[in-house]
Image (cartoon, rainbow, N blue to C red):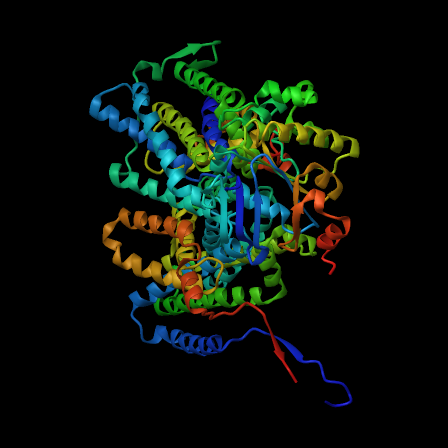
Amino acid sequence: MLGGLYALFATGLSLVFGVMRLVNLAHGDLIVLASFLSLVIVDNVGWNPFTTLVLVIPLMAALGFALQYLLLNYTLDSGLAPILATFGLSVIIQNALLEQFSADQQRLHVGSIETDSIRITSEISIGWFSLIMFLVAVLLLVGLQLLIRRTRLGRSLRATSDDQRTAQLVGIDNRTLYAVAMAISLVTAAIAGVFLGVYTNFDASSGPARLIFGFEAVIIGGLGSLWGTLAGGIVLGVSQAIGAEISIGWGDLAGNLVFLAILLVRPRGLFPGPEPE
Amino acid sequence: MGALLEVENVSCFYGDFQALFDVSIEVGEGETVAIIGANGAGKSTLLASVAGLLRAASGQVRFDGALVGQMPAYRRVAAGIALVPEGRRIFPSLTVEENLRIGGHRRRRGPWGLREIYELFPALDVLSGRWGGTLSGGEQQMCAIGRALMGNPRLILLDELSLGLAPKVIKAIYATIGVISQQGTTVVLVEQDIGQALAAADRAYCLLEGHVSLHGPTAELTREHVVAAYFGVR
Amino acid sequence: MSTHGAMAPTVAVVRRTWTSAVAAVALACILGVLVTVPWWASQGLQRDFVEFFTLLTMAQMWNLLAGYAGLVSIGQQAFIGIGGYSLYMLGDRGGVHPFGAVVLGGLVAAAISIPAAALAFRLRGGYFAIGTWVIAEVLALLTLNGTDFGLDLGGGVGVTIYSAALLDRGLRAHGTYWLALGAGAGAVLVAYALLCSRVGLALTAIRDDETAARSLGVNVLRTKVLVWIVAAFGCGVAGGVWFLNLVRVDPAAAYTVNWTAYMIFIVVIGGIGTIEGPIVGTIVFFVLQQELANYGVWYLIILGSVAVLVAVFVRGGIWGVVERRFGLNLFPVQRRVRIDPR
């Protein structure tokens, strides 16, 4: 069930990669940042974590826009610079969070729905919350798919990711478009962050794990296909669950090993979309 | 009397390589001007600098009297300049109709809309749902021109229209250029195929290794002149 | 003019400049002084030097990978950790002398880097970077859960390297220092030698335009793998030295991504794609570390911010600026054609 959420991490990552060939190494930390933002609002205003999304989403979107427009847009001419810059950002965010919130584990609480579950059979029960998370993730993926296929903005995104020079020739302003794409990516990160913060503990250094899960979901599922990413997320989630069943410490390891195995055997992923340029 | 497009003493570089040396051309509103020259003469570079894909290292580009040299390409589209690039560059992730629609991204007012484009190129109407990457050369060319027209430009720049196309297709496309020109749009054609270009144009410039080697009304240019200017024979 | 025909001017391919000749002499002197350090410096200073040279080694390796082969790895900590744990395994369990184990650890790292390459090289660019990180994480997890596989590496608590601890204090300090100096100087020299060789030409071609290089017959993959293996060796040795100094190793210290953070900061700020850059960068890093030691976490935030800004806006780092302004080249890699007219 966690697969849906992993797919969500992955979507933000691959959206940005698809449009501007940028791998945002700080994506995981931005997700954690969103969790913390929510926490701050909850602690100070007493809202339900889901309600905080009303604030967290616009904040993250604005952050994404500014980040891209003011900084990352200047890295796009180089293969090296974006990786270095986003890695640096990752370190900065992690340490800033550490400074602000110390290394304590945190959690967002929404009441009993966290632990309620539905019995499917006498052996298997699914947490209500996990189910909701999955559904939200699917909904969001559908929403994004619609955005990309049906709207004017989506058209511009596709065109720019195909051929950014020619896109300029039809009047598309690259720099603003990239900033919008990053903003959308951070919106997915915001939602992912809040949901994940309810589902499990988090702290200042949880970012890299999120990044790695998102990345593995993309690669397992296959670059270039949104539904492939969902499948990838599910495969990853299931692998981790099985691993954890065998022995607690093995959850992450199992996921990583499955990822490596797929990388070895089917490097283009399980459901590769059209080969990106 | 200002011409619609004035390129004054423009020099362009690709890194250390100089592609244009102090090139000046002038295009009046409503004219059709051809720019001919061999491969590497600088024709595409010239168009790129007018369209905004390349910044001139020196010199000015004036459009309708205003200096546009510093304007990024996407703003020049809004100002009324459209480039149909070499190789057509249709967006493969968009359908034919989406490719056309995105041409109208800047929403300039004018005679060209989806319906008018389909009238001009009936074949596109049939293909409207196909993905951009599946079109043939001629279909791509029609789509690319249609895409540029959707922006209702005052000046349309056509880079190597006939490249890779069958003669029959080339003829058909040049016929439509005539229609476009009749609507009042200013046309600048870059071509290696001298015959078609000169037949379609009012005036012509010939470029040789980054310099203007010949220019004048097409009616007055003799074959000898052109050949000499094209190949650099003294 | 002689009737034998004017002789064609002789042409020589030359690399030295007078600045580099001066620099070479100066560096040789510095090296000479550095060798004598254990005999007159305090323990504290020696340890500082060990840290300095270890970081320098890692930085040079990372620079080779990213600045020349175009391989941005954020998983080099995998090899650092392997170096550390190999030291333990070979030293304590294998009975090898710790000093030798350090070098062997590098070879172990190099060996493991080959299957790692088989996996990582299936990815490109930013995804390659994350892939290397995953490999490092996997190694960390395997080490952590080692007992489940029948390999007791001390789990999360780590192990003490008794073979090192039991050495005579003075000998260990001296030996560690000289190993570190050897690694650091070796890294610089190996990098320089590599770049002056045909491999270096291939690398520069790849860096400029990979497709063009391939079409000229450069075996891009083999060149990259070669650099990858060399870098793994270097990091393995550096890791071995570091943990020899510390006398104990645990997964968190061995496989932390902080190693990569330091490497990146050093190389980016010092100047990527040059040999002088990492040297300058390590010096800057060290100075900053001393100055900002009291600020705790802010130190990393500041360092990170500087690195990001330099990576985006001052691409060549400090040495890049120096090189542009003064045309200085202490380790000249460029070949110049000198024509002597006769």
B177 sits left or right of C58 in the view: right
Residue C217 image offset from top left, x and y in percent: 70, 56
Query: Between C249 and A217, which is closer to the camera in this rendering?
Result: A217
Query: Between A57 and C121, which is closer to the camera in this rendering?
Result: A57
Residue C106 image offset from top left, x and y in percent: 52, 58
What residue lies at 48% left-to-right and 66% top-to-bottom?
A: C188
Residue B69 image offset from top left, x and y in percent: 47, 46
Q: Please identify the quarter of the rendering in which residue B147 is found.
A: top right
Q: Can residue B206 be seen in this view?
A: no
Residue B178 image offset from top left, x and y in percent: 67, 30
Q: Is residue A117 visible?
A: yes
Q: Is residue A150 above or below residue A258?
A: above
Quarter holding the C terminus of chain C is bottom right
Q: Please identify the quarter of the rendering in which residue C167 is found.
A: bottom left
What residue lies at 30% left-to-right and 57% top-to-bottom?
A: C289
C33 sits left or right of C295 in the view: right
Which residue is farthest left?
A44
C336 sits left or right of C46 in the view: right
Q: In this view, does B158 lie above or below C337?
A: above
Q: Please identify the quarter of the rendering in which residue C242 is found.
A: bottom left
Quarter holding the N terminus of chain C is bottom right
